[in-house]
Image (cartoon, helix red, strand yellow):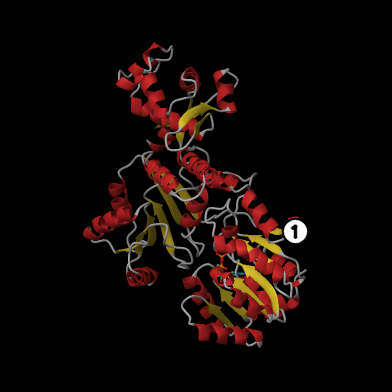
Amino acid sequence: MIAPQAETILKEKFGYDHFRAGQNQAISRVLAGESTLVVMPTGGGKSLCYQIPAMLLSGLTLVVSPLIALMKDQVDALNDNGIPAAFINSTLDYQEIADRLDQARSGQIKLLYVAPERFDTDWFVQRLGSTDISLFAIDEAHCISQWGHDFRPSYLNLANVAAQLPSQPPVIALTATATPRVAQDICQRLAIPADGMINTGFERSNLSFKVVRDQDEDRYLLDYLKLNVDQAGIIYASTRKEVDRLYTFLAHKKLPVAKYHAGMSEAQRAANQEDFLFDRKPIMIATNAFGMGIDKSNVRFVIHAQIPKDVESYYQEAGRAGRDGLPSEAILLFKPQDLQVQRFFIDQSEGDDEHKQRQYEKLKMMERYANTDQCLQQFILNYFGQNGTKPCGRCSNCLDDRESVDVTVDAQKVLSCVVRLHERFGKGVVAQVLAGAHNQRVLSFHLDQLSTYGLMSSRRQRDITTFIDFLAAGGYLETRGGQYPTLGLTVKGAEVLRGQAQVFQKTAQKAEQHLEVDD
Ligand code: ADP
Ligand code: ZN
Protein backbone atom coordinates (compact mmCIF):
# COMPACT_ATOMS: atom_id res chain seq x y z
CA MET A 1 0.00 0.00 0.00
CA ILE A 2 1.25 3.38 -0.97
CA ALA A 3 1.64 6.05 1.66
CA PRO A 4 -1.09 8.69 1.26
CA GLN A 5 1.58 11.39 1.45
CA ALA A 6 3.14 9.97 -1.70
CA GLU A 7 -0.09 10.61 -3.62
CA THR A 8 -0.23 14.10 -2.25
CA ILE A 9 3.29 14.85 -3.42
CA LEU A 10 2.50 13.37 -6.83
CA LYS A 11 -0.38 15.81 -7.19
CA GLU A 12 1.00 18.89 -5.47
CA LYS A 13 4.64 18.85 -6.45
CA PHE A 14 4.49 17.10 -9.82
CA GLY A 15 0.95 17.85 -10.94
CA TYR A 16 -0.04 14.27 -11.84
CA ASP A 17 -3.23 12.54 -10.77
CA HIS A 18 -2.25 8.90 -10.91
CA PHE A 19 0.80 6.78 -10.53
CA ARG A 20 1.92 4.92 -13.58
CA ALA A 21 2.45 1.17 -13.62
CA GLY A 22 5.20 0.17 -11.24
CA GLN A 23 5.70 3.56 -9.61
CA ASN A 24 3.59 2.93 -6.52
CA GLN A 25 5.10 -0.51 -5.92
CA ALA A 26 8.60 0.93 -6.23
CA ILE A 27 7.83 3.81 -3.88
CA SER A 28 6.18 1.55 -1.30
CA ARG A 29 9.16 -0.77 -1.25
CA VAL A 30 11.66 2.03 -0.93
CA LEU A 31 9.71 3.70 1.87
CA ALA A 32 9.67 0.34 3.67
CA GLY A 33 13.46 0.34 3.45
CA GLU A 34 13.66 -2.48 0.90
CA SER A 35 16.24 -2.43 -1.87
CA THR A 36 14.60 -2.51 -5.28
CA LEU A 37 15.37 -2.83 -8.98
CA VAL A 38 13.04 -0.90 -11.27
CA VAL A 39 12.92 -1.94 -14.91
CA MET A 40 10.74 0.37 -16.97
CA PRO A 41 10.86 1.45 -20.61
CA THR A 42 12.28 4.82 -21.53
CA GLY A 43 9.78 7.51 -20.67
CA GLY A 44 8.05 5.17 -18.23
CA GLY A 45 8.63 7.48 -15.29
CA LYS A 46 11.57 6.05 -13.39
CA SER A 47 12.67 9.33 -11.81
CA LEU A 48 9.59 9.70 -9.61
CA CYS A 49 10.36 6.32 -8.05
CA TYR A 50 13.15 7.95 -6.05
CA GLN A 51 12.16 11.62 -6.20
CA ILE A 52 8.94 11.09 -4.25
CA PRO A 53 10.55 8.96 -1.52
CA ALA A 54 13.26 11.63 -1.30
CA MET A 55 10.58 14.09 -0.19
CA LEU A 56 9.29 11.73 2.48
CA LEU A 57 12.47 10.32 3.95
CA SER A 58 14.25 12.18 6.71
CA GLY A 59 17.74 12.16 5.25
CA LEU A 60 19.37 12.74 1.89
CA THR A 61 18.67 10.82 -1.31
CA LEU A 62 21.87 10.28 -3.20
CA VAL A 63 21.36 9.80 -6.93
CA VAL A 64 24.09 8.36 -9.13
CA SER A 65 23.65 9.40 -12.73
CA PRO A 66 26.24 9.00 -15.48
CA LEU A 67 25.38 12.10 -17.44
CA ILE A 68 26.25 15.63 -16.65
CA ALA A 69 23.71 17.12 -19.07
CA LEU A 70 20.86 15.07 -17.66
CA MET A 71 21.83 15.86 -14.11
CA LYS A 72 21.60 19.60 -14.54
CA ASP A 73 18.22 19.36 -16.26
CA GLN A 74 16.78 17.16 -13.57
CA VAL A 75 18.05 19.36 -10.78
CA ASP A 76 16.69 22.48 -12.49
CA ALA A 77 13.31 20.81 -12.91
CA LEU A 78 13.22 19.79 -9.24
CA ASN A 79 14.17 23.26 -8.06
CA ASP A 80 11.44 24.71 -10.27
CA ASN A 81 8.98 22.45 -8.42
CA GLY A 82 10.26 23.76 -5.11
CA ILE A 83 12.24 20.62 -4.30
CA PRO A 84 15.71 21.39 -2.96
CA ALA A 85 18.25 19.49 -5.07
CA ALA A 86 21.82 19.92 -6.27
CA PHE A 87 24.39 18.08 -8.33
CA ILE A 88 28.08 17.40 -8.07
CA ASN A 89 30.19 16.68 -11.12
CA SER A 90 33.41 17.62 -12.86
CA THR A 91 32.12 21.04 -13.89
CA LEU A 92 32.44 22.25 -10.28
CA ASP A 93 35.59 23.24 -8.42
CA TYR A 94 36.66 21.90 -5.06
CA GLN A 95 35.07 24.67 -3.00
CA GLU A 96 31.73 24.36 -4.76
CA ILE A 97 31.75 20.61 -4.16
CA ALA A 98 32.57 21.09 -0.47
CA ASP A 99 29.75 23.66 -0.16
CA ARG A 100 27.20 21.37 -1.67
CA LEU A 101 28.28 18.49 0.51
CA ASP A 102 27.82 20.78 3.53
CA GLN A 103 24.32 21.68 2.37
CA ALA A 104 23.54 18.01 2.00
CA ARG A 105 24.80 17.24 5.49
CA SER A 106 22.83 20.04 7.08
CA GLY A 107 19.64 18.89 5.36
CA GLN A 108 19.25 21.96 3.14
CA ILE A 109 18.94 19.75 0.07
CA LYS A 110 16.93 16.55 -0.23
CA LEU A 111 18.43 15.15 -3.44
CA LEU A 112 22.06 15.14 -4.45
CA TYR A 113 22.96 13.99 -7.98
CA VAL A 114 26.46 12.67 -8.37
CA ALA A 115 28.49 11.24 -11.27
CA PRO A 116 29.74 7.69 -10.59
CA GLU A 117 33.42 8.66 -10.95
CA ARG A 118 33.10 10.83 -7.84
CA PHE A 119 33.03 7.76 -5.66
CA ASP A 120 36.47 6.78 -6.88
CA THR A 121 37.99 9.44 -4.60
CA ASP A 122 38.29 8.51 -0.94
CA TRP A 123 37.77 11.94 0.57
CA PHE A 124 34.45 12.24 -1.20
CA VAL A 125 33.20 8.93 0.17
CA GLN A 126 34.46 9.86 3.64
CA ARG A 127 32.67 13.17 3.66
CA LEU A 128 29.49 11.47 2.57
CA GLY A 129 29.91 9.09 5.47
CA SER A 130 28.96 11.79 7.95
CA THR A 131 25.77 12.60 6.05
CA ASP A 132 22.47 10.98 6.93
CA ILE A 133 21.66 9.19 3.69
CA SER A 134 18.17 7.69 3.52
CA LEU A 135 18.22 6.33 -0.02
CA PHE A 136 20.86 5.43 -2.57
CA ALA A 137 19.48 5.66 -6.11
CA ILE A 138 21.45 4.32 -9.07
CA ASP A 139 20.22 5.39 -12.49
CA GLU A 140 21.22 3.54 -15.69
CA ALA A 141 21.96 0.61 -13.40
CA HIS A 142 22.76 -1.74 -16.29
CA CYS A 143 26.16 0.02 -16.44
CA ILE A 144 27.15 -2.11 -13.44
CA SER A 145 27.01 -5.36 -15.43
CA GLN A 146 29.61 -6.63 -17.81
CA TRP A 147 26.77 -8.44 -19.55
CA GLY A 148 25.17 -5.09 -20.29
CA HIS A 149 26.00 -3.06 -23.37
CA ASP A 150 27.36 -0.05 -21.55
CA PHE A 151 29.51 -1.40 -18.75
CA ARG A 152 31.34 1.31 -16.76
CA PRO A 153 34.11 0.31 -14.38
CA SER A 154 33.28 3.12 -11.94
CA TYR A 155 29.85 1.56 -11.47
CA LEU A 156 31.40 -1.58 -10.02
CA ASN A 157 32.64 0.44 -7.09
CA LEU A 158 29.12 1.56 -6.25
CA ALA A 159 28.36 -1.84 -4.71
CA ASN A 160 31.11 -1.23 -2.13
CA VAL A 161 30.00 2.32 -1.53
CA ALA A 162 26.42 1.20 -0.90
CA ALA A 163 27.57 -1.46 1.53
CA GLN A 164 29.82 0.94 3.42
CA LEU A 165 27.50 3.91 3.94
CA PRO A 166 27.09 4.17 7.73
CA SER A 167 23.34 4.77 7.53
CA GLN A 168 22.89 1.56 5.48
CA PRO A 169 20.20 3.03 3.20
CA PRO A 170 18.17 0.87 0.82
CA VAL A 171 19.26 0.95 -2.83
CA ILE A 172 16.96 1.70 -5.74
CA ALA A 173 18.51 0.71 -9.07
CA LEU A 174 16.80 1.83 -12.28
CA THR A 175 17.21 0.86 -15.92
CA ALA A 176 15.33 0.66 -19.21
CA THR A 177 17.50 -2.02 -20.74
CA ALA A 178 18.22 -5.22 -18.92
CA THR A 179 18.23 -8.76 -20.21
CA PRO A 180 17.35 -11.31 -17.49
CA ARG A 181 21.05 -11.93 -17.07
CA VAL A 182 21.83 -8.24 -16.55
CA ALA A 183 18.93 -7.84 -14.12
CA GLN A 184 20.22 -10.76 -12.10
CA ASP A 185 23.69 -9.29 -12.10
CA ILE A 186 22.45 -5.91 -10.86
CA CYS A 187 20.49 -7.53 -8.03
CA GLN A 188 23.40 -9.67 -6.98
CA ARG A 189 25.93 -6.86 -6.94
CA LEU A 190 23.69 -4.42 -5.09
CA ALA A 191 22.24 -6.98 -2.68
CA ILE A 192 18.70 -6.53 -3.99
CA PRO A 193 16.56 -9.55 -2.99
CA ALA A 194 15.24 -11.86 -5.70
CA ASP A 195 11.69 -10.60 -5.21
CA GLY A 196 12.87 -6.98 -5.25
CA MET A 197 12.52 -6.43 -8.98
CA ILE A 198 9.67 -4.37 -10.38
CA ASN A 199 9.45 -4.95 -14.09
CA THR A 200 6.71 -3.20 -16.04
CA GLY A 201 7.85 -4.72 -19.30
CA PHE A 202 9.67 -3.04 -22.12
CA GLU A 203 6.98 -2.49 -24.68
CA ARG A 204 6.76 0.91 -26.34
CA SER A 205 3.28 0.90 -27.77
CA ASN A 206 3.71 4.21 -29.63
CA LEU A 207 6.78 3.07 -31.58
CA SER A 208 6.58 1.43 -35.00
CA PHE A 209 9.67 -0.57 -35.81
CA LYS A 210 10.76 -1.02 -39.36
CA VAL A 211 13.62 -2.78 -41.10
CA VAL A 212 14.52 -1.63 -44.61
CA ARG A 213 16.86 -4.05 -46.35
CA ASP A 214 19.39 -3.42 -49.09
CA GLN A 215 18.35 0.04 -50.17
CA ASP A 216 20.51 2.98 -51.09
CA GLU A 217 20.67 4.83 -47.79
CA ASP A 218 21.16 8.33 -49.24
CA ARG A 219 18.14 7.96 -51.49
CA TYR A 220 16.03 6.53 -48.68
CA LEU A 221 16.97 9.25 -46.21
CA LEU A 222 16.36 12.01 -48.70
CA ASP A 223 12.92 10.66 -49.61
CA TYR A 224 12.03 10.08 -45.98
CA LEU A 225 13.09 13.53 -44.82
CA LYS A 226 11.23 15.21 -47.65
CA LEU A 227 8.09 13.33 -46.66
CA ASN A 228 8.53 14.25 -43.01
CA VAL A 229 9.40 17.93 -43.10
CA ASP A 230 9.33 19.83 -39.83
CA GLN A 231 9.56 16.63 -37.82
CA ALA A 232 12.35 16.16 -35.31
CA GLY A 233 14.44 13.04 -35.65
CA ILE A 234 17.80 11.43 -35.10
CA ILE A 235 19.86 9.63 -37.73
CA TYR A 236 22.49 7.35 -36.26
CA ALA A 237 25.54 6.33 -38.29
CA SER A 238 28.21 3.91 -37.15
CA THR A 239 31.31 6.05 -37.77
CA ARG A 240 32.29 9.72 -37.47
CA LYS A 241 33.26 9.72 -41.11
CA GLU A 242 29.80 8.53 -42.11
CA VAL A 243 28.20 11.20 -39.89
CA ASP A 244 30.28 13.86 -41.65
CA ARG A 245 29.40 12.47 -45.05
CA LEU A 246 25.67 12.26 -44.40
CA TYR A 247 25.70 15.70 -42.84
CA THR A 248 27.38 17.25 -45.89
CA PHE A 249 25.06 15.41 -48.24
CA LEU A 250 21.82 16.37 -46.45
CA ALA A 251 22.90 19.94 -45.63
CA HIS A 252 23.66 20.36 -49.32
CA LYS A 253 20.06 19.35 -50.02
CA LYS A 254 18.95 22.22 -47.78
CA LEU A 255 17.67 20.04 -44.97
CA PRO A 256 17.82 21.43 -41.40
CA VAL A 257 20.48 19.06 -40.09
CA ALA A 258 22.94 19.21 -37.20
CA LYS A 259 25.69 16.73 -36.38
CA TYR A 260 27.33 15.28 -33.31
CA HIS A 261 30.26 12.95 -32.73
CA ALA A 262 33.18 12.60 -30.35
CA GLY A 263 35.64 13.97 -32.90
CA MET A 264 34.15 17.47 -32.60
CA SER A 265 35.07 20.07 -30.02
CA GLU A 266 32.98 20.27 -26.89
CA ALA A 267 31.77 23.75 -27.83
CA GLN A 268 30.66 22.59 -31.27
CA ARG A 269 28.85 19.62 -29.84
CA ALA A 270 27.07 21.73 -27.25
CA ALA A 271 26.01 24.29 -29.87
CA ASN A 272 24.70 21.62 -32.24
CA GLN A 273 22.87 19.86 -29.45
CA GLU A 274 21.12 23.11 -28.56
CA ASP A 275 20.16 23.66 -32.20
CA PHE A 276 18.54 20.27 -32.11
CA LEU A 277 16.86 20.61 -28.71
CA PHE A 278 15.28 23.93 -29.63
CA ASP A 279 14.20 22.70 -33.08
CA ARG A 280 16.37 25.20 -34.93
CA LYS A 281 17.90 22.16 -36.64
CA PRO A 282 15.42 19.39 -35.89
CA ILE A 283 17.38 16.60 -37.59
CA MET A 284 20.43 15.31 -35.74
CA ILE A 285 22.97 13.11 -37.48
CA ALA A 286 25.17 11.44 -34.92
CA THR A 287 27.23 8.52 -33.74
CA ASN A 288 26.13 6.64 -30.64
CA ALA A 289 28.02 9.27 -28.63
CA PHE A 290 24.84 11.31 -28.89
CA GLY A 291 21.70 10.88 -26.94
CA MET A 292 22.26 9.48 -23.48
CA GLY A 293 20.50 11.90 -21.23
CA ILE A 294 18.94 13.92 -24.03
CA ASP A 295 15.38 14.48 -22.90
CA LYS A 296 13.74 15.75 -26.06
CA SER A 297 10.19 14.55 -26.01
CA ASN A 298 9.04 15.29 -29.57
CA VAL A 299 11.49 13.11 -31.52
CA ARG A 300 9.29 11.56 -34.22
CA PHE A 301 11.79 9.20 -35.82
CA VAL A 302 15.09 7.51 -35.13
CA ILE A 303 16.77 6.07 -38.21
CA HIS A 304 19.84 3.88 -38.02
CA ALA A 305 21.68 4.31 -41.30
CA GLN A 306 23.87 1.34 -40.31
CA ILE A 307 23.30 -1.57 -37.99
CA PRO A 308 24.34 -0.90 -34.36
CA LYS A 309 26.35 -3.28 -32.22
CA ASP A 310 23.59 -4.99 -30.26
CA VAL A 311 19.89 -5.10 -29.52
CA GLU A 312 20.26 -3.22 -26.23
CA SER A 313 21.95 -0.26 -27.93
CA TYR A 314 19.42 -0.38 -30.72
CA TYR A 315 16.43 -0.34 -28.39
CA GLN A 316 17.88 2.40 -26.26
CA GLU A 317 18.74 4.60 -29.23
CA ALA A 318 15.51 3.87 -31.10
CA GLY A 319 13.66 4.47 -27.84
CA ARG A 320 14.62 8.14 -27.93
CA ALA A 321 11.76 8.52 -30.38
CA GLY A 322 8.32 9.26 -28.97
CA ARG A 323 9.06 9.98 -25.33
CA ASP A 324 5.92 12.12 -25.37
CA GLY A 325 3.87 9.01 -26.12
CA LEU A 326 2.85 10.07 -29.64
CA PRO A 327 3.25 7.71 -32.60
CA SER A 328 6.86 7.60 -33.78
CA GLU A 329 9.05 5.48 -36.02
CA ALA A 330 12.22 3.49 -35.42
CA ILE A 331 13.82 2.47 -38.70
CA LEU A 332 16.85 0.31 -39.33
CA LEU A 333 18.48 0.50 -42.75
CA PHE A 334 20.20 -2.83 -43.12
CA LYS A 335 22.94 -3.88 -45.51
CA PRO A 336 24.88 -7.05 -44.64
CA GLN A 337 28.23 -5.37 -45.38
CA ASP A 338 27.64 -2.94 -42.48
CA LEU A 339 28.15 -5.86 -40.10
CA GLN A 340 31.79 -5.82 -41.11
CA VAL A 341 32.23 -2.39 -39.50
CA GLN A 342 30.86 -3.66 -36.20
CA ARG A 343 33.06 -6.77 -36.36
CA PHE A 344 36.03 -4.50 -36.91
CA PHE A 345 35.09 -2.44 -33.84
CA ILE A 346 34.86 -5.61 -31.76
CA ASP A 347 38.25 -6.82 -32.95
CA GLN A 348 39.84 -3.47 -32.20
CA SER A 349 38.18 -3.15 -28.82
CA GLU A 350 39.96 -3.62 -25.56
CA GLY A 351 39.02 -6.61 -23.50
CA ASP A 352 39.88 -10.29 -23.57
CA ASP A 353 38.71 -12.95 -25.98
CA GLU A 354 35.79 -13.85 -23.80
CA HIS A 355 34.57 -10.27 -23.92
CA LYS A 356 34.92 -10.18 -27.70
CA GLN A 357 33.06 -13.44 -27.98
CA ARG A 358 30.17 -11.95 -25.99
CA GLN A 359 30.11 -8.95 -28.31
CA TYR A 360 30.03 -11.19 -31.38
CA GLU A 361 27.12 -13.12 -29.89
CA LYS A 362 25.26 -9.87 -29.36
CA LEU A 363 25.97 -8.65 -32.86
CA LYS A 364 24.61 -11.93 -34.13
CA MET A 365 21.30 -11.28 -32.37
CA MET A 366 21.18 -7.83 -33.93
CA GLU A 367 21.76 -9.45 -37.31
CA ARG A 368 18.86 -11.78 -36.60
CA TYR A 369 16.67 -8.79 -35.81
CA ALA A 370 17.57 -7.32 -39.20
CA ASN A 371 16.62 -10.51 -41.01
CA THR A 372 13.71 -11.86 -39.01
CA ASP A 373 10.16 -12.01 -40.33
CA GLN A 374 8.77 -12.21 -36.80
CA CYS A 375 7.10 -9.14 -35.21
CA LEU A 376 9.97 -6.72 -34.52
CA GLN A 377 8.63 -5.44 -31.21
CA GLN A 378 8.10 -9.03 -30.07
CA PHE A 379 11.59 -9.99 -31.16
CA ILE A 380 13.01 -7.24 -28.93
CA LEU A 381 10.76 -8.11 -25.99
CA ASN A 382 11.78 -11.77 -26.26
CA TYR A 383 15.39 -10.67 -26.27
CA PHE A 384 14.80 -8.92 -22.96
CA GLY A 385 13.16 -12.02 -21.58
CA GLN A 386 9.58 -10.80 -21.92
CA ASN A 387 7.57 -13.61 -23.45
CA GLY A 388 3.90 -14.24 -24.07
CA THR A 389 3.19 -10.92 -25.80
CA LYS A 390 1.08 -10.57 -28.95
CA PRO A 391 2.42 -9.31 -32.30
CA CYS A 392 2.37 -5.50 -32.24
CA GLY A 393 0.44 -4.98 -35.46
CA ARG A 394 2.47 -1.83 -36.23
CA CYS A 395 5.96 -2.95 -37.27
CA SER A 396 7.09 -3.55 -40.83
CA ASN A 397 6.86 -7.31 -40.35
CA CYS A 398 3.35 -7.22 -38.89
CA LEU A 399 2.27 -4.98 -41.77
CA ASP A 400 3.93 -7.17 -44.35
CA ASP A 401 1.00 -8.65 -46.23
CA ARG A 402 2.94 -10.68 -48.75
CA GLU A 403 2.05 -14.33 -49.11
CA SER A 404 3.89 -17.02 -47.18
CA VAL A 405 5.21 -19.84 -49.33
CA ASP A 406 6.71 -23.18 -48.41
CA VAL A 407 10.46 -23.00 -49.07
CA THR A 408 11.37 -26.21 -47.26
CA VAL A 409 13.04 -27.80 -50.28
CA ASP A 410 15.29 -24.80 -50.92
CA ALA A 411 16.11 -24.67 -47.23
CA GLN A 412 17.11 -28.34 -47.33
CA LYS A 413 19.44 -27.62 -50.26
CA VAL A 414 21.22 -24.91 -48.29
CA LEU A 415 21.33 -26.89 -45.07
CA SER A 416 22.73 -30.00 -46.72
CA CYS A 417 25.38 -27.90 -48.46
CA VAL A 418 26.43 -26.53 -45.08
CA VAL A 419 26.70 -30.10 -43.77
CA ARG A 420 28.70 -31.23 -46.82
CA LEU A 421 31.11 -28.38 -46.20
CA HIS A 422 31.55 -29.71 -42.65
CA GLU A 423 30.40 -26.34 -41.26
CA ARG A 424 33.83 -24.95 -42.04
CA PHE A 425 32.93 -22.16 -44.48
CA GLY A 426 31.11 -18.86 -44.36
CA LYS A 427 27.97 -17.92 -46.22
CA GLY A 428 29.88 -16.55 -49.22
CA VAL A 429 31.38 -19.93 -50.07
CA VAL A 430 28.12 -21.77 -49.32
CA ALA A 431 26.33 -19.49 -51.78
CA GLN A 432 29.07 -19.94 -54.38
CA VAL A 433 28.91 -23.71 -54.15
CA LEU A 434 25.12 -23.75 -54.42
CA ALA A 435 25.23 -21.33 -57.36
CA GLY A 436 27.90 -23.45 -59.04
CA ALA A 437 30.54 -20.71 -59.19
CA HIS A 438 33.85 -21.46 -60.90
CA ASN A 439 36.13 -19.24 -58.89
CA GLN A 440 39.60 -20.04 -57.59
CA ARG A 441 38.46 -20.63 -54.04
CA VAL A 442 35.83 -23.18 -55.01
CA LEU A 443 38.17 -25.00 -57.38
CA SER A 444 41.17 -25.04 -55.07
CA PHE A 445 39.17 -26.73 -52.33
CA HIS A 446 37.61 -29.09 -54.93
CA LEU A 447 34.20 -27.90 -53.83
CA ASP A 448 32.92 -28.43 -57.37
CA GLN A 449 33.08 -32.16 -56.59
CA LEU A 450 30.41 -31.86 -53.88
CA SER A 451 26.97 -33.33 -54.52
CA THR A 452 25.41 -29.97 -53.62
CA TYR A 453 27.53 -28.06 -56.15
CA GLY A 454 25.32 -26.07 -58.51
CA LEU A 455 22.17 -27.32 -56.78
CA MET A 456 20.63 -23.84 -56.93
CA SER A 457 22.29 -22.67 -60.14
CA SER A 458 19.01 -21.25 -61.42
CA ARG A 459 19.21 -18.53 -58.76
CA ARG A 460 21.57 -15.61 -58.52
CA GLN A 461 24.33 -15.94 -55.95
CA ARG A 462 23.11 -12.78 -54.26
CA ASP A 463 19.62 -14.18 -53.82
CA ILE A 464 21.08 -17.31 -52.31
CA THR A 465 23.04 -15.19 -49.83
CA THR A 466 19.86 -13.35 -48.88
CA PHE A 467 18.10 -16.67 -48.44
CA ILE A 468 20.92 -17.87 -46.18
CA ASP A 469 20.46 -14.71 -44.08
CA PHE A 470 16.77 -15.50 -43.87
CA LEU A 471 17.53 -19.02 -42.64
CA ALA A 472 19.98 -17.68 -40.06
CA ALA A 473 17.39 -15.17 -38.83
CA GLY A 474 14.87 -17.97 -38.51
CA GLY A 475 17.30 -19.92 -36.36
CA TYR A 476 17.88 -22.74 -38.89
CA LEU A 477 21.52 -21.80 -39.35
CA GLU A 478 23.92 -19.98 -37.09
CA THR A 479 27.11 -18.08 -37.72
CA ARG A 480 30.03 -19.12 -35.57
CA GLY A 481 33.34 -17.43 -34.82
CA GLY A 482 34.46 -13.83 -35.12
CA GLN A 483 35.79 -11.78 -38.01
CA TYR A 484 35.34 -14.56 -40.59
CA PRO A 485 32.32 -16.42 -39.33
CA THR A 486 31.43 -19.90 -40.53
CA LEU A 487 27.94 -21.30 -40.98
CA GLY A 488 26.66 -24.16 -38.87
CA LEU A 489 23.43 -26.09 -38.50
CA THR A 490 21.16 -25.58 -35.49
CA VAL A 491 18.86 -28.16 -33.91
CA LYS A 492 15.97 -26.50 -35.74
CA GLY A 493 17.90 -26.69 -39.01
CA ALA A 494 18.62 -30.38 -38.47
CA GLU A 495 14.89 -31.03 -38.05
CA VAL A 496 14.21 -29.38 -41.42
CA LEU A 497 16.94 -31.42 -43.04
CA ARG A 498 15.39 -34.61 -41.67
CA GLY A 499 11.99 -33.56 -43.01
CA GLN A 500 10.53 -33.08 -39.54
CA ALA A 501 9.75 -29.38 -39.94
CA GLN A 502 8.81 -26.99 -42.73
CA VAL A 503 10.08 -23.51 -43.58
CA PHE A 504 7.88 -20.68 -44.84
CA GLN A 505 8.95 -17.37 -46.34
CA LYS A 506 7.09 -14.28 -47.45
CA THR A 507 7.39 -13.84 -51.20
CA ALA A 508 7.66 -10.74 -53.34
CA GLN A 509 4.02 -11.15 -54.42
CA LYS A 510 1.21 -9.94 -52.28
CA ALA A 511 -1.29 -12.44 -51.03
CA GLU A 512 -4.10 -12.94 -53.52
CA GLN A 513 -6.97 -11.70 -51.42
CA HIS A 514 -5.12 -8.42 -50.97
CA LEU A 515 -4.55 -8.10 -54.69
CA GLU A 516 -8.28 -8.36 -55.27
CA VAL A 517 -9.00 -5.71 -52.71
CA ASP A 518 -6.33 -3.39 -54.11
CA ASP A 519 -7.62 -3.69 -57.68
P1 ADP B 1 12.38 7.58 -17.61
O1 ADP B 1 13.48 8.04 -16.70
O2 ADP B 1 11.75 6.30 -17.17
O3 ADP B 1 12.77 7.53 -19.06
P2 ADP B 1 11.07 9.97 -16.71
O4 ADP B 1 11.19 9.72 -15.26
O5 ADP B 1 11.99 10.97 -17.32
O6 ADP B 1 11.20 8.62 -17.52
O7 ADP B 1 9.57 10.32 -17.04
C1 ADP B 1 9.14 10.49 -18.36
C2 ADP B 1 8.03 11.50 -18.43
O8 ADP B 1 6.85 10.99 -17.82
C3 ADP B 1 8.36 12.79 -17.68
O9 ADP B 1 7.95 13.86 -18.48
C4 ADP B 1 7.57 12.67 -16.41
O10 ADP B 1 7.27 13.92 -15.88
C5 ADP B 1 6.34 11.91 -16.86
N1 ADP B 1 5.68 11.18 -15.77
C6 ADP B 1 6.29 10.41 -14.84
N2 ADP B 1 5.39 9.87 -13.99
C7 ADP B 1 4.17 10.29 -14.39
C8 ADP B 1 2.82 10.09 -13.90
N3 ADP B 1 2.56 9.32 -12.84
N4 ADP B 1 1.83 10.68 -14.57
C9 ADP B 1 2.08 11.43 -15.65
N5 ADP B 1 3.31 11.69 -16.14
C10 ADP B 1 4.36 11.13 -15.53
ZN1 ZN C 1 4.98 -6.18 -35.00
User: Where 102 falls versus 518 (above or below)?
Assistant: below
147 to the left or right of 424: right
For residue 266, what is the image quadrant?
bottom left
In the image, what residue type sits under mark 1? Pro
User: Dot 1 corresponds to which residue?
Assistant: 193
x, y (%) of residue 97?
54, 82
- Whether residue 491 is visible to the viewer of this picture, yes or no, is yes
For residue 483, what is the image quadrant?
top left
x, y (%) of residue 503?
52, 26
x, y (%) of residue 264?
32, 65
User: Where 357 falls versus 194 (above or below)?
Assistant: above
| Camera-nearest residue between 149 and 491 | 149
Location of the N terminus by quadrant is bottom right
User: Where 362 falls versus 491 (above or below)?
Assistant: below
| Camera-nearest residue between 429 and 386 | 429
- Whether residue 78 is visible to the viewer of this picture, yes or no, is no
- Which residue appears farthest toward the front when viewing the image? 122
